[in-house]
Image: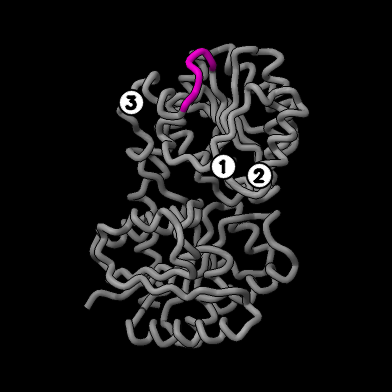
């Protein structure tokens, strides 16, 4: 009988953790070495439709209001009963909330293999949340880090080195291919044809993404390269304040706020350069997507960025907060499009060779086998 593995996700909303978890679910289901189950804390989100073809059966949800009310106890009891009745052998959680809920429930159910995840280095959690996560990690048999930078952070926070495994995010390069021409892509996105675009894809929910750094850099780039425009793909409660900042910087006529963008392949296809300005990261899915689309990147040198971007080869790494250096690098690439295209081509090769879905699946299955046989 095949071992049963449960992937527990927070929701089906668009986000790096959710996309990676659902991609892993698909890869495991297609490899057919494990009986794959999927559960969530919230059933909401447009990514739900993306796994309909997998025929996973029931996808139970265990909705939480907070960790402090009676509902949490009720949902934990439901979860424990469900994983026992489903005879789950491996529980794999993927973010802060599922780590805490899943590791507690998995321990109560005495599941033989419990795997938590860490995908960030700093800037996301308050003191209470950090302590709750440490408790969750103590209940896990293994913690998956998506970069060596995250592994170092976990070990620095007291998790035993032998308890941490690094499995890099994987990316299906085919997802970033488009059959549309540039003219068609511009029309689809409603963008003017006479501009050159610099693009950033990041949520506008967390200040750690540091959009203000990008906008300050954008103002300097605009002064040097008048035909440039800036595409901001992301949604969240910070969006209005960022619109105000763009207006204050005098670049609002060249700054396009796209919100949630479902046409990422077409967005990247019309982009000259792609950017990430984060103060902290684990391992950015956006950087992988940029490179998979053969775009040169200019990103802050935080978290796992140094593990995928080779300075001067596939893009540029700049210090967090240094908008002047970011602008300098962007201007240089805009002024040398041949060099920019060569960087993008090298980056695409790196993603295909080192950060494929096949590599992600092989490392995950190897971890499952090792923990089942420990």
Q: Is residue 142 left or right of residue 303?
A: left
Closest to the observer: 53 or 115? Answer: 53
Closest to the observer: 163 or 236? Answer: 236
Where is mark 2, residue-wise? 209
Where is mark 3, residue-wise? 180
- Spatial separation of the CA atoms under disc 3 and disc 2: 30 Å
Where is mark 1, residue-wise? 234
Of the residues under marks 3 and 2, which one precedes in the sequence?
3
Q: Is residue 329 left or right of residue 345?
A: right
Q: Main secondary structure of the magenta part?
A: loop
Quarter where residue 47 is shown: bottom left
Q: Is residue 140 visible?
A: no
- Spatial separation of the CA atoms under disc 1 and disc 3: 22 Å
Looking at the image, which residue is at 54% across and 65% down? Answer: 164
Closest to the observer: 212 or 282? Answer: 212
Q: Is residue 145 left or right of residue 323?
A: left
Q: Position of residue 223 (x, y in %)?
A: 71, 15
Span shown in magenta: 190-195
Element under label 1?
loop
Dot 1 and dot 2 residues touching (CB under 8 Å): yes
The correct choice, above or below, for 45 with respect to 254 in the image is below
């Amino acid at each position: 009988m095949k071992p049963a593995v449960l992937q527990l996700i927070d929701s089906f909303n668009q986000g790096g953790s959710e996309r990676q978890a659902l991609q892993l679910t698909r890869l495991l289901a297609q490899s057919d070495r494990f009986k794959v189950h999927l559960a969530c804390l919230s059933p909401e989100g447009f990514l739900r439709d993306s796994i309909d073809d997998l025929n996973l059966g029931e996808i139970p949800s265990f909705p939480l209001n907070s960790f402090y009310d009676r509902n949490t106890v009720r949902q934990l009891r439901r979860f424990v009963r469900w994983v026992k009745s489903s005879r789950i052998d491996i529980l794999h959680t993927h973010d802060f909330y599922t780590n805490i809920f899943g590791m507690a429930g998995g321990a109560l159910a005495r599941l033989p293999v419990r795997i938590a995840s860490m995908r960030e280095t700093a800037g996301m959690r308050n003191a209470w949340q950090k302590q709750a996560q440490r408790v969750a990690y103590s209940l896990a048999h293994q913690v998956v880090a998506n970069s060596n930078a995250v592994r170092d952070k976990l070990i620095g926070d007291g998790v035993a080195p032998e308890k941490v495994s690094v499995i890099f995010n994987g990316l299906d390069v085919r997802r970033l291919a488009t059959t549309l021409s540039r003219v068609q892509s511009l029309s689809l996105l409603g963008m003017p044809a006479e501009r050159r675009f610099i693009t950033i894809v990041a949520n506008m929910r967390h200040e750690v993404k540091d959009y203000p750094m990008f906008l300050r850099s954008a103002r300097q780039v605009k002064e040097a390269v008048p035909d440039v425009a800036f595409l901001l793909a992301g949604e969240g409660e910070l969006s209005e304040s960022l619109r105000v900042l763009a207006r204050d910087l005098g670049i609002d006529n060249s700054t396009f706020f796209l919100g949630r963008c479902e046409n990422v392949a077409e967005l990247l296809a019309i982009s000259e350069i792609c950017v990430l300005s984060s103060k902290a990261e684990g391992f950015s899915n956006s950087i992988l997507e940029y490179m998979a689309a053969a775009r040169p990147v200019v990103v802050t040198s935080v978290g796992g960025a140094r593990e995928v971007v080779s300075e001067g080869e596939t893009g540029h790494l700049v210090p967090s907060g240094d908008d002047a250096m970011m602008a300098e690098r962007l201007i240089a690439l805009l002024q040398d499009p041949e060099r920019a295209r060569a960087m993008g081509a090298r980056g695409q090769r790196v993603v295909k060779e080192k950060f494929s879905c096949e590599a992600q699946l092989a490392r995950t299955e190897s971890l499952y086998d090792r923990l089942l046989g420990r």
